[in-house]
Image: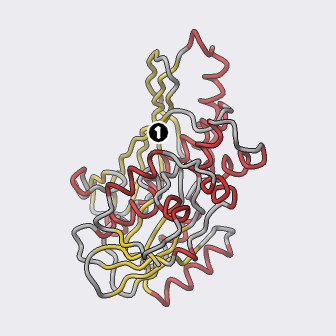
Amino acid sequence: MLIAADNNDDAGVYRISPELALIQTVDFFTPVVDDPYDFGRIAAANALSDVYAMGGTPKMAMNIVAFPMAKLGASVLRAVLAGGAAKLREAGAVLLGGHSVEDDEIKFGMAVTGFVDPAKILANQGLKQGDRLVLTKPLGTGIISTALKAGLASPATVKTVTEQMAALNKTAAEILSTFPVSACTDVTGFGLLGHLCEMVAGTGRHVVVNSGAVPVMAEAKELAAIGLVPAGSHNNRKFRENMVMLPAGFDPVVRDILFDPQTSGGLLFGCGGKMAAELCRRLQDAAVLAADIGWVEDGPEGIVVR
C-alpha cells in the first residue's frame, strides 16, 4: 500500500509492480442539477477527478445507484446512467458494472480504478518552499447549486455551472504529468481553503493565498452577496478556523466563497516558481484555466489570506 486512508488523500494507491500501481476511489451524491443526464455527467466527472488528482489515468468504473423507481421511473434512471457513461467514454475508461438499491432519494456515483506509475504519484502533501499555488477551475458551484435548489438561478447560470462541473480534469492532469509538481488535490467538499489546509496540516508549511487572484464565477459572487451560501461553507470555515488567518474586516462574501464546497472542482497544485509559470502557459494554451493564487514561504504552519 503506497497511500491509504490515514493520509487523508484523494484516493488509495496500491503497488502492483515496480512500474504499476492501482488508484482506487469512490464518490456518490444526491442531484446538484435537475436534468438527470447532466447529473450523471457531473457525478461521473466528480468521481473520476480523484484519479486525475493523484496523477493517474482512469481505466474502469462501477456504478453506484440509489433510486426511487416507483417515484421517478426507468427513463430517469436511464438518463442518469447515460450521462455517466458518456463521461467515462470521454475519459477513456470502461464501465464494468455496478450495484443499485431502492431508495427514497436518488443518489449516483462511481467506484473508479486508475493506473499510475508509482514514481509519478501526486499526493496532496509535499508542497515546497517557493512553490506557486495554481487552481484550474473557478469557485462557486456550491453557492450556485444552493440557488438552483431555491429556484433562484437563471437558466444561463445553470447552464454555465453544469458545464463546469461536468468538465473533466483530464487535460490538466495530462499536462501536470510532464512537470515537477510537488503536491496536488482536487477542490471538492471542503472548499478551496479546506483542501489547502489538508495540503499543509502537519507539514510545517506556511501558505499565502492572494484572494484577489482566486477565480470565482460571477454569478456566485452575486448570489453569495444576497446570502445564498450553503451550510457546508460555514461548516468548513468552523472546522479549519484555527489554521486560516483572515485580515480584520475581510469581505465575508469572499470568505464564504473561499470555503464554498465544490462539486467536481478544479485541480489545486504546487510547482516551483519558474516551472509554474511555464506550466500555467501550457495549461492556458490547452484552454484550461490556470490561476496563480498564492505561494509557499517561511512562517508558522497555516494559511494566510490576503
Residue behind mark 1: 61
Q: Is residue 298 above or below residue 118?
A: below
Q: Nearer the viewer, residue 101 or 121?
A: 101
Quadrant of the image occupied by residue 89: top right
Q: In the picture shown, does residue 90 fall above or below 56? A: above
Taking 56 as reference, is 183 above or below it?
below
Q: Position of residue 244 (x, y in %)?
A: 35, 69
**Nearest the eye: 106 or 144:** 144
Q: Residue at x 30, y 88 (%)?
A: 298
Q: How many neighbours does mark 1 have within 10 angstroms: few (below 14), some (14-19), or many (20 or more)?
A: many
Query: x, y (%) of residue 229?
Result: 54, 49
Across and down, in percent, residue 197 comes to: 34, 65
Q: Residue at x 42, y 62 (%)?
A: 185
- What's the amino acid at mark 1? Ala
Tell me which colouring the rendered structure shows.
Answer: secondary structure
Residue 91 visible at all: no
Q: Hey, which residue is sitting farthest top in the picture?
A: 70
Mark yes or no: residue 23 visible.
Answer: yes
